[in-house]
Image (cartoon, grey):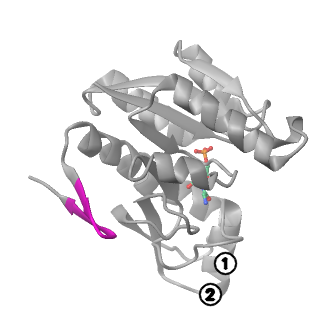
Amino acid sequence: MLNVVVLVSGGGTNLQAIIDSVESGAITNTKITGVISNNKNAYALERAKKHGISAQCISPKDFETRDRFNEVFLETIDSMQPDLIVLAGFLVVIPEAMIEKYRNRIINIHPSLIPSFCGTGYYGLKVHEAALARGVKVVGATVHFVDEGTDTGPIILQKAVEVEQGDTPEVLQRRVMEQAEWKILPKAIDLIANGRIQVEENLVKILP
Ligand code: GAR
């Protein structure tokens, strides 16, 4: 059984997609052990509680130094003994010690086709604003392992989504979530839970 901890900051629609997929059996061999948010008002925490999943807030704001936050954050994660950490709209930089310790066991969903519209400053709605400003006709989402860079780790799954005439950033964000994110994030977890993902250097192989 893959023991999964999900990290969130906001609405938690990706968390919801994971919960629903575990409950429906679309994700197998997986248990969501806990949800952590850096934002105590995140609706994602309510979603977890409604499904009987332990949910807690750990915020850098509640610590005197970033180093102290990083230590307590890592201790909290360690105490949950995760096989996989899922960043589902988590907007806090992951401490290097955690990346090192959980190498190829942390995945992130990013709302663009990496390497477009990613890296520092590209998160949430900003990604979709930038895509519309550039006039691209195809956007999408990416699930990747987390390494020391921002959105640079090995790519697991991607899905393309068409931009439509008259799209606003909000409309495009919703379409990318519905057509791509809520599909490929649960799919990636299921592949990992069933031993079908192999990482060599920074390339991912999906086993049959
Ligand atoms: C999602 O669109 C996710 O891809 C994005 O934040 C949103 C969270 O929504 N993540 C990033 O931009 C990370 N760089 P949710 O809380 O409803 O899942």
- On the rendered structure, is 2 left or right of 66? left
Residue 146 lies, with reference to residue 83, above or below; the image says below
Q: Secondary structure at mark 2?
A: helix
Q: Position of residue 110 (x, y in %)?
A: 52, 60
Coordinates of residue 77 in the picture (x, y in percent): 57, 32
Q: CA distance from mark 2 to mark 1?
A: 6 Å
> As rendered, which of 10 and 173 lies closer to the eye?
10
Regarding residue 168, the answer to whether it shows in the image is no
Q: Residues within 10 Å of mark 1 (few under 14, many from 20)?
A: some
Asked if disc 2 and disc 1 are in contact, CB closer than 8 Å, the reply is: yes
Label number found at residue 130: 1
Q: Residue at x 53, y 84 (%)?
A: 136
Q: Main secondary structure of the magenta part?
A: strand
Q: Residue at x 66, y 59 (%)?
A: 124
- In this picture, residue 188 sits left or right of residue 52: left
Element assignment for label 1: helix
Q: Which residues are magenta?
A: 198-205
Question: Looking at the rendered structure, which numbered label has been put on residue 11?
Answer: none
Residue 169 in the image: above or below residue 25: below
Q: Residue furthest bottom?
A: 134
Say the numbered circle drawn on residue 134: 2
Report x, y in % for residue 181: 45, 53
The magenta stretch spans residue 201: yes
**Total residue callouts:** 2
Image position of 104 with respect to 80: above or below: below
| Amino acid on which the number 2 mark rests in the picture | Arg
